[in-house]
Amino acid sequence: MCGIVGIIGKQPVAPLLVDALKRLEYRGYDSAGIATLDAGLIKRRRAEGKLINLENLLGNDPLSGNTGIGHTRWATHGVPNETNAHPHQTEKLAIVHNGIIENFRELRDELIADGYNFVTETDTEAVAHLITRSMDNGLDPRSAVSQNLERLEGAFAIGILFKGEENLIIAARRGAPLAIGYGEGEMYLGSDAIALSPFTNVLSYLEDGDWAAITSGGVEIHDVSGGRVQREKQVTVASSVMVDKGNYRHFMLKEIYEQPEVISHTLSHYLDFATSSTRFPKELPFDFANLDRIAISACGTAYLAGLVSKYWFERYARVPVDIDIASEFRYREMPLAKGGLSLFISQSGETADTLAALRYCRAQGQHIGSVVNVRESTMARESDAIFQTLAGPEIGVASTKALTCQLSVLASMAVAVGRAKGVLSGQQEEKLVHNLSEAPKFANQALKLEQEIQKIAGDLAKVKHVLYLGRDTNYPLALEGALKLKELSYIHAEGYAAGELKHGPIALIDEDMPVIVIAPHDKIFDKTVSNMQEVAARGGRIILITDRTGAAKASMDTEHTLIMPDMPDILTPLIYSIPAQLLAYHTAVFMGTDVDQPRNLAKSVTVE
Ligand code: M6R
């Protein structure tokens, strides 16, 4: 939810901290701050709002010092102002924190009773005073941190700098990710590999309950029992080049345009185009042929990818799928048969609710599979099998290429399971694999519609409410179109299964209500046409996204008809995502909202 970074360097670290925070800003952008040690004294600068405000502040009032920590915030406790911005400081230390300390009230009351003065509304300040109190009582920094970690309830990753300790940063993690980076006589700490990518690609990931004392000479890691442990050093492929906007105005637009390439990359990992067959690792801990049920959990757009895959698994593999929003699933106490497959879908691999659902399923004796984009993520590390999406870093808060890569993996998997179970013949597998191989071509064709979509967006930018309709695999896409529009343009939008319209939402239809109908010409197209007629009869404004055959057959008056290429059914949720993304993107651009960092959101939601 927040991004943290720490550096023990050989040169002034303030510019490096800011540079690393730029790559973490996707995690939160309500405020930012850094603290350094200058001749043993802690100095800090903090600013409300985007990182640029901190940069400007540092331009006028620079910080020196070769050791420092930094933070970019997504507010959980306390409004996003300078006082609540991290690092939080006491006389002895400065701390940055990602996560939530659930028992902070109890700790705060106890510390106030002991004479400690609180100046912020944050939960983090309780941790700062807790450790300070132990140091006031004579403990050294290492003992003070390790002794107090067990008092903290909740999920967190922290980095702490101590007055007079130029060669020390202490870090700890429980439930939120934290990586240690190794340099030449320099050491780093960061929420992810990309933050540290210009400095080092050699990393160790702390495990849950670990705390670490980082010095310029290396790191000393202790596990939850306090014993010294080694965490494997890994060479990561994360590169700062990948997080460049290039010539695009926004990351989101760049990521939309990357889709033909990343879909192709992902599909070719799971499909063998030469033999027109699927290829999943042979050494999976479960057998596709024996699957008789799959439980899927995820959040937001990733959940909608899962919802599309329910249709695919049930249609192509005849395997029933239970799918839940992870925040509901984790408390639903669903009975799960031992040895079944639970599948988790996540771009970041760090979403707290999805991770909690994963741990619940693990405790129920399920096999754990994850469709994740970040291979080094917690979810990937806690899974028995990783089905990685090869989307590359997604920086725009709105998920675009991550979704189409998730769909690419899930479609390939449904076909593989169908074939393994004998539901699909070799010929049927061949045909579906061939169909999927055409996704990059159709994605390119969909991108060519951008100018036309821009015109429709000009009209959408003038309305207050929008309804999206779809059926079958395009019903989740209607939900996704509405989610994208809401999060980017702040226009109220709802997605519905087209057949559900007459059960309530039709009451909303009037001449001010655009209804976006996602309806490729498929076996239930005629049903959707009936729903459009219901809308037209009530004066609703129809924006139809269909194909050449659909446009010809609908023969209806629409405000706009966007004509996509004709394509096989299995591809429509993948390819029709693109006009939905472009529509939301251009509407947001028209409205002047912050496309890459919409208000109140964060890319990775690592709190409950
Ligand atoms: O990293 P995850 O895929 O687990 O994230 C899940 C959701 O938070 C995410 O898809 C969110 O809904 C996006 N902002 C939607 O564009």
Image (tube, rainbow, N blue to C red):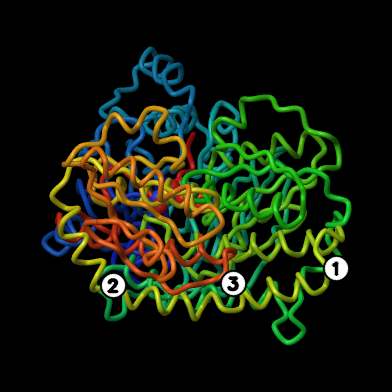
Write down the residue under mark 2: 450
Q: Foreground residue, 48 or 409?
A: 409
Write down the residue under mark 3: 236
Return the residue found at the far top: 113
Write down the residue under mark 1: 282
Left/right placement of residue 116 relative to residue 334 reads: left
Residue 181: image quadrant is bottom right
Disc 3 marks a residue whose amino acid type is Thr
Left/right placement of residue 447 relative to residue 476 reads: left
| Separation of marks 3 and 2 at Cα, in angstroms | 35 Å
In front: label 3 or label 1: 1
* Label 1 packing within 10 angstroms: few (<14), some (14-19), many (20+): few
Residue 322 percent across, percent down from the top left:
68, 38
Disc 2 marks a residue whose amino acid type is Glu
- Disc 2 or 1, which lies upstream in sequence? 1
* Label 3 packing within 10 angstroms: few (<14), some (14-19), many (20+): some
Residue 191 percent across, percent down from the top left:
48, 55
Residue 452 percent across, percent down from the top left:
24, 70
Residue 241 higher or lower than 570, as above or below: below
Label 3 beta carbon within 8 A of ligand 1 = no
Residue 445 percent across, percent down from the top left:
40, 78
Q: Are marks 3 and 2 in contact (CB under 8 Å)?
A: no
Left/right placement of residue 412 relative to residue 345 reads: right
Question: Image quadrant for the N terminus?
Answer: top left
Residue 337 higher or lower than 398, as above or below: above
| Separation of marks 3 and 1 at Cα, in angstroms | 25 Å
Left/right placement of residue 275 relative to residue 80 reads: right
Please tell me which residue is depicted at 46% across the width and 61% down the height of the picture.
520
- Disc 3 or 2, which lies upstream in sequence? 3
Which element carries disc 2, helix, strand or loop? helix
Disc 1 marks a residue whose amino acid type is Lys
Please tell me which residue is depicted at 72% across the width and 57% down the height of the picture.
316
